[in-house]
Amino acid sequence: MKKGKGKIILIIIVVVVAIAAFGSAGNGNSKDGEAQPEAQQTTQENSAEEQAPEPDVPADYVSALNQAQTYCDSMHMSKQGIYDQLISEYGGQFEPEAAQYAVDHVEADWNANALAKAEDYSETMHMSKQGIYDQLTSEYGEQFTSEEAQYAVDNIQADWNANALAKAREYQETMSMSSEAIRDQLTSEYGEKFTQEEADYAIANL
């Protein structure tokens, strides 16, 4: 009987020790759990510092930027063209500083805008390659840079022969011009600026 009691007491002691050890381990996890929110809080504070807002931008600057984005997205205007429109007394009437802020911060691909304008001139006005380039760079036209205009005429999908023929038909139908007069108008540097080959194609297919 004494041996049996001894075994029972030994088992109880082992169980108690095991429970105590498990409880200590649980308390350790609890401490780790308490430390984790502190680390998260530090990370959140650092993130908040990185995302801190920039100093306030004047309302007119924001309005100018909004207008500039509209001109860019809907009308495919050049940087200089947008600036001039923003400060114009017939346009936005913004101060030069607001307009400059706008064109410096607008999200734009000026090459893509020049190409879009070139496509408009080709499809709606049947202009020549040289005519489009000159219109894109003109101070009285679109005011793109020479590099942007060159990108546009190099990448446009246009049939210049078809454009020359369309122009020739316009001259013939609306002005009753002779074939030779049309040819001269198509190739003139003061006219349409088509190549001689494009003009010859147009006259041959009138």
Image: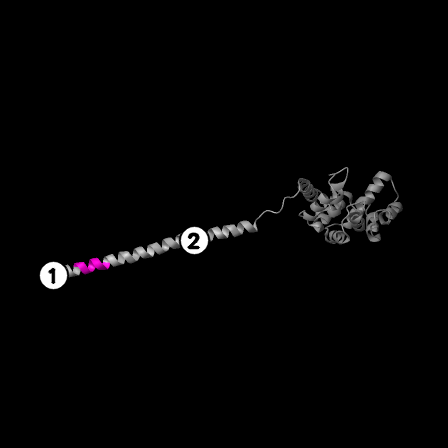
Q: Which residue is at 45% across, 52% downward?
A: 38
Res 93 quadrant in image: top right
Does 10 appear in magenta? yes
Report crowding for label 2: few under 14, some 14 to 19, many 20 or more residues within 10 A (C-alpha). Answer: few
Specify whether 143 is left or right of 61: right
Quadrant of image for the C terminus? top right
Report crowding for label 1: few under 14, some 14 to 19, many 20 or more residues within 10 A (C-alpha). Answer: few
Q: Earlier in the sequence, mark 2 or mark 1?
A: 1
Res 166 quadrant in image: top right
Most common SS among magenta residues: helix
Q: Position of residue 177 (x, y in %)?
A: 88, 42
| Residue bearing mark 1 | 2
Q: Which residues are magenta?
A: 8-14
Q: Compute the Cα span from label 2 to label 1.
A: 52 Å
Q: Amino acid at mark 2?
A: Gln
Q: Amino acid at mark 1?
A: Lys
Specify whether 90 is left or right of 9: right
Quadrant of image for the N terminus? bottom left
| Residue bearing mark 2 | 36
